[in-house]
């Protein structure tokens, strides 16, 4: 009887968990489904009378690839892709090198520097916006992708903790043996540690790519000249929601949101295994 009660309790707990997960899934999926459905609507403005469009059309996707004075989606997409790729390379290198230095190497002031990095991460990056803007303006780097990339990659090394946790799992004996054999730190890092740390490398690459791909605040602050062809996707899509444009471009905005999510979705599906391994591996040690 006691065993049966325990089984019933366990079953009810599992059912409650599944119901909760189902409810949360619906809450998360409803806005996404609505966005996708609205992007196929023939109506150009906001339609709140029905969940599904009364007339379906792919005209919004076609219009996105036929730029006008307001919507220049192909150029926005290309701008964002270039910035994201360059930042991905620079930020990944910074994060992995800082993580290697703090995990494998021993040098004076190592722990104080790590503590300072952790403290700095407690403050939102938005607090530095005004200072960053005036520094970039002093060097004539506003309204340029170089300035935008610098902002994204400059502090990326502070996000070293997860990569450091993964590097902490690399056997120290291998690194010590390589040093005894005369290998430099650069060679140990590139030829030994990195090949053994593919999951965390993938995780870092994805994270570095996502930052500029989804960012609006810093992009809007730096690319503030009002030149539509220089916008990133986030700024361009937000421009479509202007009061004077929303009735004509809202469904195009939804279509653009769907297209922007496709590269990220494909990236996650391909790299999901390594992404999860990178997170869990990096959480083993702090």
Image (tube, rainbow, N blue to C red):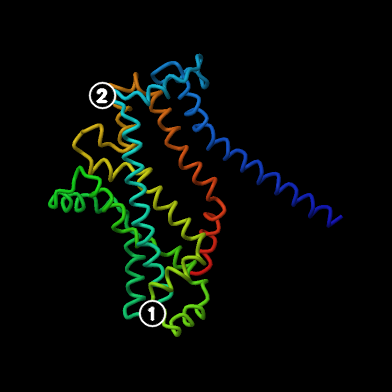
Q: How many C-alpha atoms fall within 10 Å of the one at disc 2: few (<14), some, or many (≥20)? A: few
What residue lies at 37% left-to-right and 67% top-to-bottom?
Answer: 98
Q: Which mark is residue 4?
A: none
Q: Where does residue 235 sit, x and y in percent of width and height?
A: 30, 36
Residue furthest front as drawn: 182
Give the vertical position of 52 relative to 221 (above or below).
above
Q: Dot 1 corresponds to which residue?
A: 106
Tell which tag, 1 or 2, sits nearer the viewer.
2
Residue 69 bears which disc, if any? Answer: 2
Q: Residue at x 25, y 36 (%)?
A: 230
Residues 32 and 194: in front is 194
Vertical placement of residue 170 versus 151, above or below: below
In this view, the residue farthest toward the top is 55
Q: CA distance from mark 1 to mark 2?
A: 56 Å
Q: Residue 102: x, y in percent?
A: 39, 72
The kind of secondary structure element at disc 2 is loop
36 vs 219, left or right, is right
Q: How many marks?
A: 2
Comparing 197 with 106, the one in front is: 197
* 187 to the left or right of 29: left
Q: Report x, y in % for residue 83.
A: 32, 46
């Amino acid at each position: 009887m006691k065993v049966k009660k325990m089984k019933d309790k366990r079953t009810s707990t599992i059912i409650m968990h599944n119901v909760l997960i189902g409810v949360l899934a619906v809450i998360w999926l409803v806005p996404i489904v609505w966005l996708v459905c609205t992007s196929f609507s023939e109506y150009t403005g906001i339609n709140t009378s029905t969940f599904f469009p009364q007339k379906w059309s792919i005209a919004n996707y076609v219009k996105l690839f036929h730029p006008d004075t307001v919507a220049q989606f192909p150029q926005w997409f290309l701008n964002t892709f270039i910035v994201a790729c360059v930042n991905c390379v620079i930020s990944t290198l910074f994060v992995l090198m800082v993580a290697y230095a703090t995990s494998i190497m021993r040098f004076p002031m190592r722990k104080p520097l790590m503590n300072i990095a952790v403290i700095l991460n407690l403050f939102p990056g938005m607090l530095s916006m005004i200072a960053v803007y005036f520094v970039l303006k002093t060097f004539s780097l506003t309204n340029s992708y170089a300035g935008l990339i610098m902002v994204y990659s400059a502090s990326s090394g502070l996000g070293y903790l997860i990569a450091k946790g993964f590097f902490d799992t690399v056997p120290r004996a291998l690194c010590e043996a390589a040093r005894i054999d005369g290998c430099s730190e650069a060679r140990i890092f590139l030829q030994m540690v990195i090949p053994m740390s593919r999951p965390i490398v993938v995780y870092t690459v994805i994270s570095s790519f996502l930052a500029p791909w989804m960012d609006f605040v810093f992009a809007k602050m730096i690319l503030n000249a009002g030149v539509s062809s220089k916008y990133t996707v986030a700024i361009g899509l937000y421009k479509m929601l202007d009061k004077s444009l929303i009735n004509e471009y809202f469904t195009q905005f939804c279509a653009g949101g769907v297209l922007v999510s496709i590269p990220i979705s494909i990236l996650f599906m391909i790299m999901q295994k390594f992404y999860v391994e990178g997170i869990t591996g990096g959480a083993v040690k702090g």
